[in-house]
């Protein structure tokens, strides 16, 4: 199984979250299965934010959920603080959840409309029987304050009385109240208006500092991911294409897919009457994950595809000379400075 | 197939002082408030605004789709010199789909799930152009190929659910183009799509528009989308046009504080990572109980007493740049603007 590889993983004992060769398979019909995630590996070091980007259907959300075992992956390992979550039983996984929280895209539908904000934010404390009635109240108020909501004006209200951005703040408060170590954010701002999006992105940065959080930030918007992440993992059809420190990835993308994605971002520049550069568009669409292309999964849309791409699946190997930059491509846009060109048997260790 | 009206008016679309309000349990909601704009043949007007700014209601009103649903419309909408509000419903229906076509955000809900896409494309041509079914079907295949759908002969027989989101939006575009409209209203046409597909669809719209010399109104919340695809940009806030200028001018030199704040709040790829985004505090105005004075004043960092007392007019600066602000960002433009409004001196005392 290639297109994956683990060359990019750092020392296992440094990582808070380490995902190895994760596979998630869903049943599509009687005898057909979809591999939403086909052997991806990634790691997150404490205090780091790792961004997961890709188009819809690339498996980024499925990966996020598989990490918290919702549902557990078909195969592969998910190490959280050295413990393989896939080997735990349901009760043991539940015990880990307070430390590892998930925040969803649609804040309004993630909140129970019948509950007051106080009940919503305080519920995790009730479930885990933390503190006394009185200390819970205090903590709820403090957490609401931390996410920028006035406790006096919010505690007794219900979700329908709040805007999308405020609901997302409530969701964040609810996730933070148990003082998790890690947050997995699945498109936390994509349903919000631009001006509100900025507020939430800033809030997440503040919360990261205040609570010392480690984050996995899943989003389709590259500019948003760029702003939030230290390391970016680019996914395509269930595979990892490229992993790099954020600035490297944007400055010198090595995978043709990353390059195409970056080129598709609409820029805040008037180019129409300037006859300037209209974005180079990436042709075609995501192939069906029921029947993924052989070899490199991106080859059907790749401007650089050659015969080899159909036959042999690329593994992640070093790219560029900046350190943490890896690409799964036979013909990357950036070659490693010292790497031997005939692919790295030395690098692609875990095949 | 051409319009019966050979360019008697200066503009293809001429909206004058259009206001739309709805009755709600809380009172009258003023969704669109005195909007004027024009679109010429072969040109694209981008309308940017956040949710609740009135941009979609504006588009629907241009199509005559808000009246009679608790909505009351005032002002004028002229298409090719013909005032469309005064037309009987029957004639309005003839214009819709034929002279003006509209593309909505969610392609799945604009398509009929139980009809083959070919039939949905053909339908409009049978209805508006009097094509026979055979003619229309043939043309549907042609249109699908023009909007970049591979093997169109086979795809005409598909149902919407068999197509991807991007392909569905292409079908919606094919339907919109079927009767060779003069004006295309695209309301968030790419919001539901992935970036790479978004780029394809925007490219497709641009080439079709150029080839057909259509006027286009591109409505979106995404400044990036209109920046590269429009000739002129209108920024809406709280139901009003707050700024209007050529794309180049507006992006280089935004004058209304809301516009620049909105631009600054967008994360871009040339900013350092973990950078703090500038934020527009507060919330968009309540359109039932509108703030007096400037709609943006409660959130504006530059607001002064005057801003909460007097509604700023849409003033004009050099370079055909319009803005609605008492204290615009660009100082050089103030002089030109001040001369225009006599009422400006009236209430300086506050």
Image: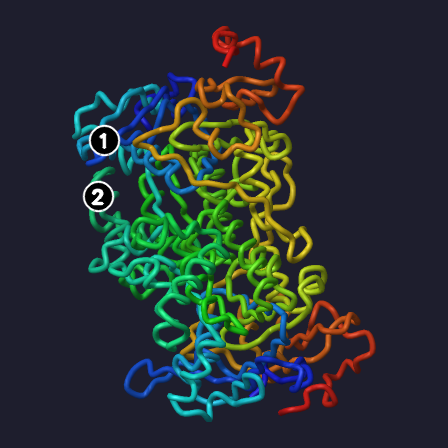
Subunit of label 2:
B
Q: Please name the residue shown 27% across and 59% down the image.
A: A113
Measuring from the top left, give residue A177's x and y in whole percent: 45, 67
Q: Which is more toward the observer, B41 or A135?
A: A135
Which residue position holds label 2?
B126
Disc 2 element: helix
Tell me whether marks 1 and 2 sit on the same chain: yes
Q: Which is more toward the observer, A210 or A221?
A: A210
Quarter residue A103 falls in: bottom left
Question: Considering only vertical position in the picture, is B199 above or below A326?
Answer: above
The residue at the far right in this view is A338
Disc 1 element: strand
Mark 2 Cα-neighbour bin, 10 Å: few <14, some 14–19, many ≥20:
some
Q: Please name the residue shown 38% across and 25% down the image.
A: B13
Subunit of label 1:
B
Q: Nearer the viewer, mark 1 or mark 2?
A: 1
Q: Which is more toward the observer, B64 or B101?
A: B64
Which residue position holds label 1?
B27
Mark 1 Cα-neighbour bin, 10 Å: few <14, some 14–19, many ≥20:
few
Colour scheme used in the picture?
A: rainbow
Q: Please name the residue shown 62% across and 51% down the image.
A: B276
Left or right: where A159 falls relative to B277? left
Question: Considering only vertical position in the picture, is B75 above or below B60?
Answer: above
Q: Which is more toward the observer, A311 or A257?
A: A257
Q: Earlier in the sequence, mark 1 or mark 2?
A: 1
Quarter residue A126 falls in: bottom left
- The C terminus of chain A lies in quadrant: bottom right
Cα–Cα span, label 1 and label 2: 43 Å
């Amino acid at each position: 199984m290639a297109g994956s590889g683990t060359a990019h993983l750092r020392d296992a004992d440094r990582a808070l979250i380490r995902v190895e060769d994760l596979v998630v398979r869903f049943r599509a019909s009687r005898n057909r299965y979809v591999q939403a995630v086909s052997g991806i590996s990634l790691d997150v070091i404490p205090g780091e934010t790792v961004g997961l980007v890709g188009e819809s259907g690339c498996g980024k959300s499925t990966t996020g959920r598989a990490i918290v075992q919702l549902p557990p992956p078909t195969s592969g390992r998910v190490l959280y603080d050295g413990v393989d979550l896939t080997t735990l039983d349901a009760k043991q996984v539940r015990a880990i959840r307070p430390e590892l929280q998930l925040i969803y895209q649609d804040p309004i539908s993630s909140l129970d409309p019948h509950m007051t904000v106080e009940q919503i934010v305080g519920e995790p404390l009730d479930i885990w029987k933390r503190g006394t009635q009185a200390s819970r109240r205090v903590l709820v108020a403090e957490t609401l304050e931390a996410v920028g909501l006035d406790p006096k004006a919010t505690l007794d209200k219900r979700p329908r009385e709040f805007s999308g951005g405020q609901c997302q703040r409530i969701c964040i408060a609810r996730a933070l109240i148990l003082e998790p170590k890690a947050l997995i954010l699945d498109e936390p701002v994509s349903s919000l208006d631009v001006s509100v999006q900025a507020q939430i992105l800033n809030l997440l940065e503040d919360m990261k500092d205040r609570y010392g959080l480690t984050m996995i930030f899943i989003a389709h918007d590259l500019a948003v991911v760029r702003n939030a992440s230290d390391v970016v993992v680019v996914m395509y059809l269930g595979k990892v294409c490229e992993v790099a420190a954020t600035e490297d990835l944007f400055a010198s993308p090595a995978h043709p897919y990353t390059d195409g994605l970056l080129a598709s971002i609409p820029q805040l520049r008037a180019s129409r009457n300037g006859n300037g550069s209209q974005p180079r568009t990436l042709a075609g669409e995501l192939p069906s994950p029921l029947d993924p292309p052989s070899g490199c999964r991106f080859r059907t849309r790749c401007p650089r595809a050659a015969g080899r791409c159909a036959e042999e699946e690329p593994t992640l190997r070093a790219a560029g000379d900046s350190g943490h930059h890896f690409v799964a491509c036979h013909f990357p846009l950036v070659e490693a400075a010292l790497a031997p060109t005939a692919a790295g048997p030395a690098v692609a260790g875990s095949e | 197939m051409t319009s019966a009206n050979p360019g008697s008016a200066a503009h293809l679309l001429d909206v004058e002082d259009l206001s739309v309000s709805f009755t709600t349990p809380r009172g009258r909601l003023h969704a669109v408030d005195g909007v004027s704009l024009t679109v010429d043949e072969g040109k694209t007007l981008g309308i940017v605004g956040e949710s609740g700014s009135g941009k979609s209601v504006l588009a629907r009103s241009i199509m005559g789709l808000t009246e009679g649903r608790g909505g009351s419309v005032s002002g004028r909408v002229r298409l090719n010199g013909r005032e469309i509000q005064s037309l009987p419903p029957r004639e309005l229906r003839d214009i819709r789909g034929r002279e003006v076509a509209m593309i909505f955000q969610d392609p799945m809900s604009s398509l009929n799930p139980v009809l083959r896409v070919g039939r949905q494309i053909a339908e409009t041509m049978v209805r508006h152009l009097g094509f026979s079914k055979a003619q229309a079907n043939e043309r549907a295949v042609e249109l699908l190929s023009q909007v970049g759908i591979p093997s169109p002969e086979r795809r005409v027989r598909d149902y919407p659910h068999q197509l991807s989101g991007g392909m569905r939006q292409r079908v919606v575009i094919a339907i919109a183009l079927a009767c060779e409209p003069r004006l295309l209203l695209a309301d968030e046409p790419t919001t539901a799509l992935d970036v790479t597909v978004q780029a394809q669809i925007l490219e497709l719209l641009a080439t079709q528009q150029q080839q057909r010399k259509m006027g286009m109104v591109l409505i979106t919340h995404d400044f990036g989308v209109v920046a590269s695809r429009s000739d002129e940009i209108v920024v809406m806030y709280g139901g009003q046009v707050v700024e209007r200028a050529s794309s180049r001018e507006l992006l280089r030199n935004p004058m209304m504080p809301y516009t620049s704040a909105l631009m600054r709040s967008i994360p871009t790829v040339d900013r350092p990572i973990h950078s703090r985004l500038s934020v527009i505090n507060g919330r968009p105005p309540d359109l039932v109980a509108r703030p007096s004075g400037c709609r943006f004043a409660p959130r504006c960092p530059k607001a002064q007493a005057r801003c909460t007392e007097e509604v700023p007019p849409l003033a004009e600066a050099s370079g055909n740049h319009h803005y609605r602000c008492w204290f615009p960002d660009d100082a050089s433009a103030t002089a030109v603007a001040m001369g225009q409004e006599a009422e400006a001196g009236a209430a300086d005392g506050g």
